[in-house]
Image (tube, rainbow, N blue to C red):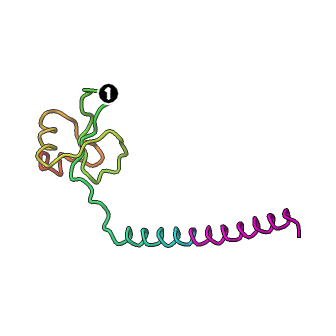
Amino acid sequence: MSDEQTHLQMLYFLRRVQLKNLQQTDHWIQEAERRQAEQAARRPPPQAPGWVLERGIGQGAPSVLVHTGACYMQFTRRRTLSRDEARQALVDGVPACTHCHPDTALGLLE
């Protein structure tokens, strides 16, 4: 047997060992992902904020609307408010969302 054949056999052996190691690593990854998914399923979903302020575009832009935390309107520029802050924002003239009616929920309109 020549040195080249021996070298080639060693490379094939190395390849088999590495494939087996890769399969083991893939198995470990799958197990870790499964455990992580199980843990995530056991955690309660994050609680929606009670009140949300939709902010305008740009630095210092005025606030756009006050929403309830469960409002289905999609917006990205927002800040969570306490009940008192939401009430104060409405009193200060920030309009109430016409879909979720936070002014009614806060008792400002009957």
Magenta-span inclusion, residue 59 = no
Q: Which residues are magenta?
A: 1-25
Assign a secondary structure to mark 1. loop
Above or below, 105 against 9 in this view is above
The residue closer to the viewer here, 28 or 103, is: 28
Q: Position of residue 109 (x, y in %)?
A: 14, 46
| 27 displayed left or right of 18 | left
Which residue is rendered at x = 24% and y = 29% of the image?
A: 62
Judged by its main secondary structure, the magenta piece is helix
Quadrant of residue 41 within the rendered picture: bottom left
Q: Position of residue 18 (x, y in %)?
A: 66, 67
Which residue is rendered at x = 30% and y = 67% of the image?
A: 44
Q: Position of residue 4 (x, y in %)?
A: 85, 62
Q: Position of residue 9 (x, y in %)?
A: 80, 68
Which residue is rendered at x = 29% and y = 41% of the image?
A: 78
Which residue is rendered at x = 25% and y = 26% of the image?
A: 60
> Three-letter amino acid code at disc 1?
Gly
The residue closer to the viewer here, 86 or 101, is: 86
Residue underneath mark 1 = 58
